[in-house]
Amino acid sequence: MQTSNNKQRALVLILTIVFFLIGIFLGKLMLTPATLTDMVNYHTKQIDAAGENVDMLFVGGSRTYRSFDPDIIDKELNIKNGLNNGSPAQRTIFSYYLLKEYLKKYDPKYVVIGSTYYGMMFEQAPDYMMYNIDRLSLKSQIEYAKVQYGLSQGLQAITGKALYLNNLWPAKMIENVKDKWKCAHGGSYLEEKIEMQPNGYKGEYKSLESGSVSYSYDTPKDVFREEDIDSKQLEYFDKMVQMCKERGIKVFLASGPCTISNIYRIDNYQGAVDFYKNYAEENGIYYYNLNYLKDREKYMPDELFIDRLHLNYEGGQYVSRMFAKIVKDEIAGKDTSHYFYKDLDDLKKHVHRIPSCACKLSYEDGMIRILADSTHNDDVKPQYRVLAYNGEEEGELKNLKVVKNWSYNNEWLINMDELRQYDFIRVQARIKNNNQPVAYDDGSLEKYKYENE
Amino acid sequence: MTLTSLVFVEFMLAVILAYFLVPKKFQWVIVLIANVVFYAVGGVKYLLYLLFTAGATYFGAIIFENINKESKEKLSQLETVEEKRELRAIYTAKKKRITFAIVLVVMGVWATIKYGNFVIDNLNVLFKNIHYDFQIGGLSLVMPLGMSFFTFQATGYMIDVYRSKYPAQRNFLKYFTFVSFFPHIMQGPFSRYDILGKSILEEHNFSYDRLCAGAARIIWGFFKKIVIADQIGISVDKIFNHYESYTGFNILCVIFFYAIQIYADFSGYMDIVCGFSNVLGIELQENFNQPYFAKSIDEFWRRWHMTLSQWFRDYMFYPISMSRVCQKIGKNARKVLGNKWGRLLPSYFALIFVWTCTGLWHGANWTYLIWGYMNFIVIVCGMHWADYYRAAREALHIKEGNPIWEGWRILRTFSLVALFRFFAVADTVSIAVGMIKRIFTNFQFQLIIDHPSKIYPGLNTAQFGLMVVGTIALVVVDILREKGKWEDVKRKTPLVLRSLIYALMMFVIFMVVPLAFEGGTGGFMYANF
């Protein structure tokens, strides 16, 4: 009887562990969507099967995989199998492990490391790691997780947090499995309005309206300070660069572009640029800040972005062509400085608009207080205007009313009764007598509409 | 080190391993080391408070035991009743003086840290109102982890020895192991020395049965805390922190959301600590008995945080109600107001102290005091008008045990408990009143119909759905426990299904638990009390 009871208990324990592991496996299969990782993994399998090499390798965050289309660069430089291994929020330590693993298999001529102003200042959020971790072998996953998070957190991250709560609906689960199947057997799947290529490049068919990039009124600017650089991140950055140099690989540090508005919202942005520039000079490698590409207001307007940080498909294609030209000239020993503005001040001289605007609404005893702010050059005095409307229909604002006309004022107190019939407030900012698009930001009136009704 | 962090799980496993690997006579030493390590992680300097409280009550108990021994010896030498009575009175007075001194010091330290700033703030408000230009500076003292729990527990031990309930523990390290027992130091239960202390010091063999039962209970505890409490807590926090941005309907919902959150949080914690202790073979008292099935507020407090209620009953209610002062009050009340008042007034008198202390024990805020008095009023009304309620029920021909009537009583009690908690949780009385007011002035049910996701701000539909499913599971388990069928159901559940359920719970916990660098989900709620 005792033996039988013990057998039962042992069986419960074993079955529980087995079911749990099955759950994790099924969860990864059904609850995680297909991502660029699936496509890149498929593509590298094809390269390996063909016994070919990867001539150019990219590592870095989202601005890397959205800014560089290896197919375009391959053609320009006459190389093969360029692979963009950028992934969401990829930070330096992960890049190091990724590069290390890929350099075991391939012998690239060029490595491009995506370099952002925040790239070495703080650690990657564990959630984001989940988008990328499957690009590493299990051994590297554990090693990386140990270094970045500590073993227990890392293991938890590897096994557990790859699961997306939003994908609990059966239809979505089936879709995930189908997409992964397509990736594994064809190297592609289609997501509406998104181009995802097996070479790791991703571009969206989406466009920002000029001036629509906004920011939160209360959020302070980001700051770059050299003393905030994380020593561990820097250590692994050095290791990455040295690893490439030892193999005779040419290293390019490249900052993928973001919107002008985003640059204006970073204190000491030039400090970050100088940091990478100096690093590149000291280490005999190359650095390009593609935010400083000349005539960017003409060739990289807001319409070529999907949000304040990332290029869209068209933008990525443009930057890829420019990057390819610059690298080609660099390799040929030509001067490439003429492609770029000298520094941030030089860039700002060529910005003749208000890049972005922010507004804040608050309710005070039956009144709505509206505060406005904007990013602009120091020698500019912006004007503001307040509109009220009821949503958008076919690109037009419904029931539009000009509540306050253009003025240099940036704070208003308006009776809620005047606004109760509207759903939104829009604050616009412009430079007077300038025919550039206005910047704007919207605030919702919904939660205030029911006050004291 | 929060109980739902991976670090704590690793710590638990290490303690279990060490506990059963060492010779049995040293098992209590492992527990002692684990206690010190656990507490020191929160800050070594806070160990001093723990040591001080343990030290003061340890010496107090030894002094009482010595006095008891001495008085017994001397009494046996006396012959007349008067002589014995006189001697007893001398020793009792001596013990009382010592008790008073030690309790004053131990509770005084606790009260200063916990209530010092509350008193100072209120004095400053008073000074301002009477136009007295003097303000007292605040104290910058941090409440050590679990101070409310270990202070009360240690004091209870000392009083038990005073009452000769059991002999004092003469080994300070063994006594300290009891006071500092790490699984229950943050949120209880309040354990009595004759149960927990005895259990810690006994030798325990490894038992696979206990391991399985303990592990299952720990998983259930994690599930309640992480999947139910933490998820619904997101919405609760959002609504409480900015109630003016939400509708009256939201506020009505949050009353019930909070009731679910606090039960899942607190009982989840209990399951984790009891499950862990069970694995070691150490007995912890239960703290919950399906409290939301209570049919009256009085009964609720016999089912919720039972060990706290028992502590106040044994160390406050009985001593006060049985005291000479109260007996005299009762006698006089009988003469003037009749038998009923004579019988009940001493209890009311004692209860007002109990509920003042219960309210303040939960927090240094007027809202907790009001919450305490709300409970007091309802309990006293229940006691006083019990006869009228019975008569009304009989007049309406409602039989005792009628399911609809019982169901109504359960719902009524749950609603009152949830509503009273409102005052406890709000930062100030005016916020609590403002929130209640908003239910009636800004209900906005139509907005919720148009946008159902506004019921659970901060959560997506999947998270809310998971929380609802978890809550249903909790209700089902509690119903089975209430009917005494839970053990039966567990036994009859097929092996494979049982394993699947455990695996599913673990899977959901993994899926929901957020990754924080410091490890673990948000802290447990009762750790703040």
Image (cartoon, grey):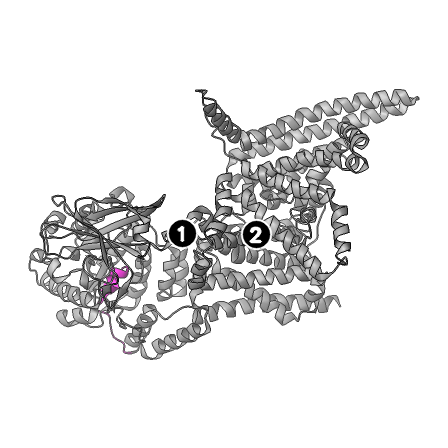
Q: Position of residue B243 (x, y in %)?
A: 44, 48
In the image, what residue type sits under mark 2?
Ala
In the image, residue A176 sits, relative to residue B64, either above or below, namely below
**Would you name the residue on which mark 2 appears?**
B259
In the image, residue B29 sits, relative to residue A419, either above or below, namely above
Mark number, residue A453: 1
Q: Position of residue A385 (x, y in %)?
A: 20, 51
- The reply to whether residue B86 is visible in this rendering is yes
Front one among A346 and B70: A346
What is the quadrant of the N terminus of chain A in the image? bottom right
- Please give left or right for residue A237 compared with residue B174 in the image: left
Label 1: element kind: loop
In the image, residue B232 sits, relative to residue A197, either above or below, namely above
What crowding class fits label 1: few (fewer than 14 Cα within 10 Å), some (14-19), or many (20 or more)? few
Front one among B494 and B34: B494
- Please give left or right for residue B267 compared with residue A331 in the image: right
Residue at (57%, 52%) from the top-left corner?
Answer: B259
In the image, residue A230 sits, relative to residue A29, either above or below, namely above
Q: Position of residue B427 (x, y in %)?
A: 49, 40
In the image, what residue type sits under mark 1?
Glu
Residue A55 falls within the magenta-colored stretch: yes
Q: Which residues are the magenta region?
A: A50-66
